[in-house]
Amino acid sequence: MSKNVLIAAFSEDHAVRLTGLTHGQLRSWDRAGFFQPRYAYEFRTAPYSRVYSFQDIVGLRTIAVLMKEYKISLQKLRKVAGELIRRGYDHWADVKLYVVKGQVHFRPPKSDDIEGVWDGQLAMVPVVDVINDVEARVDQLKKRDESQLGHVERHKFVVRNSSVVAGTRIPTATIRRFNEAGYSVDQIVKQYPSLTPEDVQAALAHEERLARRA
């Protein structure tokens, strides 16, 4: 995995852009326990309460590819998830998945053998490997114009018209919550490498102004 494109935390809007899934799918799968974000508030009714890890994004993109390109049904994917957990894999990104005649197979870590999820039979088929794809999407997500650094903006169709760090879809409210949780400016930047310290300070100053007006 290329460290230069790694971001530690992604909002729900980021997850939608990076995986091709919908907000409705993410929320439904979260409620059903099929796929829950790594970092999330106990009460998901709060805005921006779902925060996904890079591993989550890889797993979600894998599921999206299986559904859209290989026509694997959600019902079958639920069974795959249960079987992988039974075998000791607690995340979709922990193994590489393959598809043979509509059936999902996987390759255990440090093994060259590809096994059927249910029958254990071996197969040789193209891998569903989305890590490079996700890294490229994240890299595009990080690109910003220098004139946007240290600024906050709002657009009608970006994160439901909420205030975000300019050139990103990162809500200033999310930055404030990290700050309230005890994260320093540098620690927040580590969570969101696409941001600069000036971005974080601008976001916190904006949230402070909003609080004073309330």
Image (tube, helix red, strand yellow):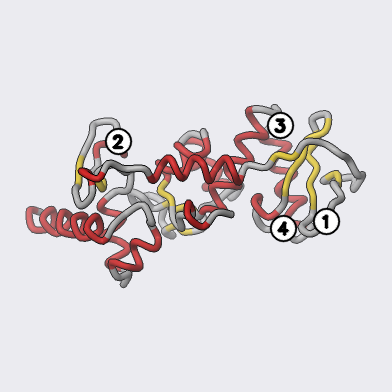
Amino acid, disc 1: Ser
User: Which percent across, then down, holds residue 137?
Assistant: 49, 40
Residue designated by label 1? 111
Front disc: 1 or 3 = 1
Q: Earlier in the sequence, mark 4 or mark 3?
A: 3
Q: Nearer the viewer, residue 194 or 205?
A: 194
Residue type, label 4: Tyr
Point out the frontmost of discs 2 and 3. 2
Gap in angstroms between the C-alphas marked 1 and 3: 25 Å
The 10 Å Cα crowd at callout 4, few under 14, some 14 to 19, many 20 or more, is some
Residue 127 image offset from top left, x and y in percent: 74, 40
Q: CA distance from mark 4 to mark 2?
A: 36 Å
Q: Nearer the viewer, residue 104 or 85?
A: 104
Q: Residue at x 20, y 60 (%)?
A: 201
Give the residue at mark 2: 158
> Residues under labels 2 and 1: Cα distance?
43 Å
Query: Residue 103 appears at what percent x and percent y?
Result: 81, 35
Q: Earlier in the sequence, mark 2 or mark 3?
A: 3
Q: Nearer the viewer, mark 4 or mark 1?
A: 1
Give the labeled residue for mark 3.
72
Graded by Cα atoms within 10 Å as few (under 14), some (14 to 19) or many (20 or more), the crowding at tag 2 reads some
Quadrant (top left, top right, bottom left, bottom right) of the C terminus:
bottom left
Q: Amino acid at mark 3?
A: Ile
Q: Dot 3: few (<14), some (14–19), or many (≥20) neighbours within 10 Å?
A: some
- How far from the left and from the top, in percent, is residue 1? 59, 54
Q: Earlier in the sequence, mark 4 or mark 2?
A: 4
- From mark 2 to mark 3, how far is it between C-alphas? 31 Å
Query: Relative to 64, does residue 179 appear above or below in the rendering?
Result: below
Find residue 89 and name its label: 4
Name the residue located 23 percent from the left edge and 34 percent from the top edge: 155
Relative placement, left or right, of 82 versus 201 is right
Q: Amino acid at mark 2?
A: Val
